[in-house]
Amino acid sequence: MFYEEPVFRPPSEANSLILQATTGCAHNACAFCGMYKGKMFRVRSREEIQRDINEAAAVTGGRVKRLFLADGDVLAMETGDLLDLLSRLNRAFPYLERVAGYAGPRDLLAKTPAELSRLRKAGLQLLYLGVESGHDQILKKMAKGVDAAGMIRAGRAAIEAGFTLSVTVITGLGGREQSLDHARATARVINAINPHFLSALTLMVLENTSLYHQIKAGKFTLLTPLESLREIAWLLEDINLSGCLFRSNHASNYLPLKGKLNDDREKLLALLKQAIKEPGRAGLRPEFLRGL
Ligand code: SF4
């Protein structure tokens, strides 16, 4: 298999075959993201991808159940090309149960409902959407490429086409200056999307991002660990979802949490409040063990 490094995947794709259909991110502009800064976006050629499919099929005997289409936004591919790829995957891997990929909000909005529905029926099943914030000003400052209304339209389009939708939000993305506003506005957008999975990451800043320079210039203040926990509590207080699996067990988070929303909200809030009250006993992840 050929991989143009670095390659990223969501934690829940740890057991999936990773196939690079594209490299880099077509947007590649978010102020907080350094994932693909060193990579030019491109759709890999049909031949390049087929070589990887053949190799993986030979090594596994076709027994691949889960497959993740990297890199940053597979929906940037032309619909016809992606449909062709999905059909080749289904032929090469007859036991395939799940094909997943990252979806940028602008790429979701660029596809018609009929195109999304065809992709879903062709086997693309799970999409990961980085909502990050529901606050218009923060989304603009972070150059996410859409406002809150656009993010809701993108998320709803995925769900209405039948995809399983997993969304991420970033604790601390409004800085100390807009922590409460960020939490409240993000809860509103998540409620409107009503995703199947919700993950909260905690902001970590790499030196190759424009956010790093904003911090150095004193224009953005990072949250302390306890401020981060308080912001997650504000978010959860306003969340109103039915049967969404919530996780904050990413390596960037100080306190791992997991539960079903709304059912487990009070339990999660109680854990957060206890951790804020007695951080020494909460087993918070130390700074040196945090990661992206
Ligand atoms: S956060 Fe996602 S959309 Fe934004 S630059 Fe990074 S990979 Fe691209």
Image: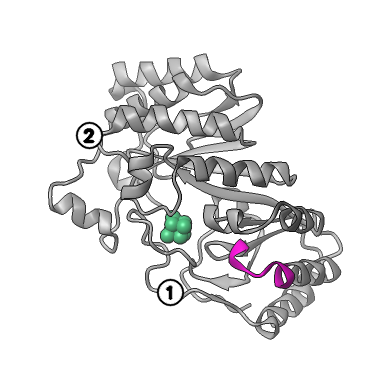
Alpha-carbon span between mark 1 and mark 2 = 32 Å
255 vs 47, left or right, is left
Mark 2 within 8 Å of ligand 1, using the beta carbon? no
Tell me which residue sits at (26%, 59%) in the image: 210
Viewer-proximal residue among 273 and 262: 262
- Measured as percent of width and height from the top left, residue 101 is found at 62, 57
Q: Residue furthest bottom?
A: 47
- Element type at marker 2? loop
Which label number is shown at residue 177? 2
118 vs 74, left or right, is right
Residue stretch in magenta = 75-82
Q: Which amino acid, by three-letter code, is at mark 1?
A: Lys
Q: Which amino acid, by three-letter code, is at mark 2?
A: Glu
Q: Residues within 10 Å of mark 1 (few under 14, many from 20)?
A: some
Tell me which residue sits at (58%, 43%) in the image: 153
- Measured as percent of width and height from the top left, residue 234 is found at 39, 23
Q: Which residue is mark 1?
A: 39
Ligand 1 resides in the quarter of the picture at bottom left
Q: Residues within 10 Å of mark 2 (few under 14, many from 20)?
A: some
Query: Which of the 4 image quadrants contains residue 52?
Result: bottom right
14 vs 47, left or right, is left
Q: How many numbered marks are there?
A: 2
Query: Which of the 4 image quadrants contains residue 170?
Result: top left
**Magenta stretch containing residue 76, yes or no?**
yes
- Measured as percent of width and height from the top left, residue 55 is found at 73, 79
Sequence-wise, the earlier of marks 1 and 2 is 1
Residue 148 position (above or below residue 283): below
- Element type at marker 1? loop
